[in-house]
Amino acid sequence: MPVIFLVGPTASGKTKLSIKLAKKLNAEIISCDSMCVYRAMDVLTSKPLTSDRRKIRHHLIDIVPPTKEFSVAEYRRMALKKIKNILGRGKTPLFVGGSGLYVKAVVDGLFASAEKDLKFRRKEERLAKKYGKGYLYKKLKRIDPGRAEKIHPNDLRRVIRALEIYHTEKIRPSELNKNTEPLKYDFKILGLDLERSELYRNIEERVEEMFKEGIVEEVKKLSRKKLSMTARKALGYSEVLGYLKGRYSLEEAKELLKKNTRHFAKKQLTWFRPDTRIQWVLPGEFSTSFARSNSK
């Protein structure tokens, strides 16, 4: 049995389906969600229910505090170790999540993109002019001390390039060359394909449920901590924080989160669609399609 990936946009039903699939495959689930790694962010990240995690063993959930930076390179290293351990127990590794970069990192390895973010560079250059070169160097030391050691504090061009790599790739520059090997195991990538109207309806319901489950109180508690740059990007954090700071009403916060979640789902699909290795199936046809493809 190969390593299985179950991907798709947020609110597509991956978590629910993964439990059924894990039982059929005698699998253990490896979360492939860049935010589920953080503790104390349960409602924000819609983590699998505790009851489901008791039924099926889950990995790479609640592994770091939200105050800590966490990179895709760290995720890949942990994920590869989990694959080996799960296979060693005679079970199937089942990756579940919508973080495309994490999927790509595990399957293909890590490479710095040739793409440049000129807007980010200009912003960093303005910060350097305002606060001095040391300001950016300290920022790099906090994010990637290994890379900072190899750059002179006054070498602004290289400092900004290192920060740019982390900003665009979510990878510490010092870790790039250590993670370039593709996955050595056979794998299959399955994608959940929903009608746009159904996906948006699921998003509406999920956001409403998040507010019932206490997202406001969770964000209030998190706002008292010095969250990492990565954790602050969790969908729902800034939207609820705006409400807590009195910028808009609770209802407006809900609508803003619904809108931003729809945009996020579109971005996820834009990432996954070009990958021809993904076998797209409708949730209702999933069991039949998977059984047919798996018998080939």
Image (cartoon, helix red, strand yellow):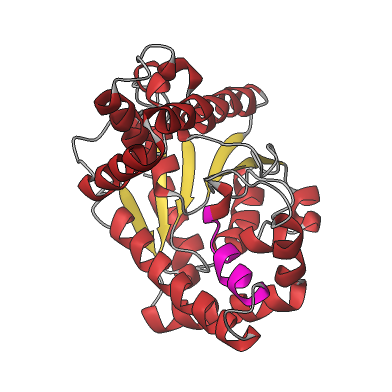
Q: Residue furthest top?
A: 150
Residue 91 visible, this angle:
yes
Q: Which residue is drawn at 57% across and 66% down?
A: 236
User: 50 or 296, which is in the foreground?
Assistant: 50
Q: Residue at x 71, y 43 (%)?
A: 62
Residue 193 visible, this angle:
no
Quadrant holding the C terminus = top left
Question: With respect to residue 209, does 47 lie above or below?
Answer: above
Horizontal arrangement in the rendering, residue 273 relative to residue 18 (left or right): left
Q: What stretch is highlighted in magenta?
A: 233-244
Q: Position of residue 172 (x, y in %)?
A: 43, 28
Q: Where is residue 110 in the image (x, y as percent from the top left)?
A: 35, 29
Q: How many marks?
A: 0
Q: Position of residue 239 (x, y in %)?
A: 56, 71
Q: Find residue 9 and report its image quarter.
A: bottom left
Q: Where is residue 199 in the image (x, y as percent from the top left)?
A: 45, 76
Question: With respect to residue 44, does 27 lie above or below?
Answer: above
User: 125 or 80, which is in the foreground?
Assistant: 125
- Assign the magenta stretch its main secondary structure: helix
Horizontal arrangement in the rendering, residue 238 relative to residue 46 (left or right): left
Q: Is 49 in the magenta?
A: no
Question: With respect to residue 150, does 170 lie above or below?
Answer: below
